Image: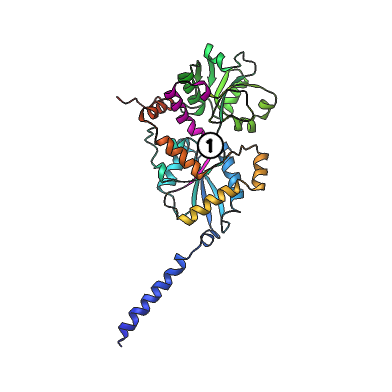
């Protein structure tokens, strides 16, 4: 037998053996000693950042191989920069995840050209908690019910034109007949709350209840707010007597519009992996997400910083988005116009 005939099979065997370790690499092998980059679509110290970092500190215990998780804040473009980076230029091997804002996943549906990603291809891990907004007036205001906001004009503070504090009063005016007058341009942090405390405005619509409880606990303790309506699919347990906006909408089409807009809040504080993550690593990340939310140490820290833990698993997030994207075209258009009337035009 010639030397060439021996060499070729031997080389083939070596090639096969060389590929075995890569194919047999376990999830634990992949993550051991590795660093996961977590893109955070919010500023350092903000609500999204706090939720993401607290989760990450405890999630490392539940990911096989116990990798480190390092946060990289990308608040630009209202969190859109983080979503676009995750979808288009991040590694897809399970070494990058993102903590997105609640609204980002709906932006492609509402026609935002800046949203350069396909929601259906993203791999959702779940959401840590819902983002439940309320509309409230200052305790000294005579407007203490939603009926009062229908009867006369009430000036409310807002941040940007597409912030929750601008969207919520615009939606309520259109769908339930309130008469909120929005004064926009306030700093989304202390600017809004100071405007209310200084009586520059009478109220704010689109306040995150969990954020207020954490950042202004004395407002809740001392009953400095008249909460007149809540925006969510489910009632906030702290506010059993405050009506839901959904209960005030009788027209079927208007209710569908409101439900579509409220889906953004239901998404809350989602975590997501990019497209094409290997299946076994995605399973591990989703399992770690769920395990962390039951972790006693995580729950203790979450309570300490007054985080509201009301999770959605990956299947629920996926279903919410599938239902939203399947809504009738005319409902989507009406919702999009309410969310951002300046950039969405009604189709002929």
Q: Residue furthest top?
A: 151
Residue 304: quarter of image: top right
Left or right of 202? Residue 296 is: right
Q: Nearer the viewer, residue 101 or 242?
A: 242
Look at the image and tell me whether residue 155 can be seen: yes
Q: Residue at x 47, y 29 (%)?
A: 259
Above or below: residue 301 compared with residue 153: below
Quadrant of the rendered image containing residue 16: bottom left
- At 48% from the left edge and 56% from the top edge, which residue is drawn? 280
- Count of marks, rendered view: 1
Residue 116 occupies quadrant: top left
Magenta span contains residue 250: yes
Q: Residue furthest bottom?
A: 1
Circle 1 packing at 10 Å, graded few (<14), some (14-19), many (20+), is: many
Farthest residue, direction right: 222
**Closer-to-camera residue (257/338):** 257
Indicate the position of residue 297 as horizontal and vertical percent values.
67, 47
Horizontally, is 9 left or right of 91 in the view?
A: left
Residue 275 location in percent, x, y? 42, 49
Q: Which residues are magenta?
A: 245-274
Quadrant of the image for the C terminus? top left
Q: Is the magenta region chiefly helix, strand or loop?
A: helix
The reply to whether residue 107 is visible in this rendering is no
Say which residue appears at 55% left-offset and 51% top-offset. Answer: 287
141 part of magenta stretch: no
Q: Which residue is denoted by mark 1 in the rendering?
A: 268
């Amino acid at each position: 037998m010639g030397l060439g005939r021996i060499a070729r099979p031997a080389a083939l065997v070596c090639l096969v053996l060389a590929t075995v370790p890569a194919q047999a690499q376990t999830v634990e092998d992949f993550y051991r000693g590795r660093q996961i980059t977590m893109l955070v679509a919010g500023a350092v110290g903000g609500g999204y950042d706090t939720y993401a970092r607290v989760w990450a500190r405890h999630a490392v215990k539940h990911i096989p191989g116990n990798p480190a998780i390092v946060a990289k804040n990308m608040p630009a473009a209202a969190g859109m920069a983080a979503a676009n980076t995750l979808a288009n230029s991040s590694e897809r091997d399970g070494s990058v995840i993102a903590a997105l804002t609640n609204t980002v996943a709906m932006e492609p549906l509402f026609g935002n050209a800046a949203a350069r990603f396909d929601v259906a291809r993203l791999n959702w891990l779940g959401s840590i908690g819902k983002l439940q907004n309320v509309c409230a007036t200052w305790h000294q205001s005579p407007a203490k019910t939603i009926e009062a906001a229908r009867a006369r004009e009430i000036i409310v503070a807002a941040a940007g034109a597409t912030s929750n504090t601008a969207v919520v009063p615009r939606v309520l005016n259109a769908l339930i007949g309130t008469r909120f007058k929005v004064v926009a341009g306030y700093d989304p942090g202390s600017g809004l709350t100071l405007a209310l405390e200084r009586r520059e405005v009478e109220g704010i619509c689109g306040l995150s209840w969990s954020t207020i409880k954490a950042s202004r606990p004395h407002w809740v303790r001392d009953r400095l707010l008249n909460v007149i309506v809540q925006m969510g699919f489910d009632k906030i347990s702290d506010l059993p007597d405050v009506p839901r906006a959904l209960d005030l909408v009788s027209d079927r089409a208007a209710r569908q519009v409101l439900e579509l807009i409220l889906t953004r809040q239901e998404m809350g504080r989602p975590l997501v992996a990019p497209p094409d993550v290997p299946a076994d690593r995605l399973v591990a990340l989703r399992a770690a997400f769920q395990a962390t939310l039951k972790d006693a140490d995580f729950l203790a820290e979450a309570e300490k910083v007054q985080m509201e833990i009301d999770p959605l698993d990956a299947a629920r997030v996926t279903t919410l988005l599938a239902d939203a994207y399947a809504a009738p075209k005319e409902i989507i258009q009406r919702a999009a116009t309410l969310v951002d009337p300046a950039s969405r035009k009604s189709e002929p």
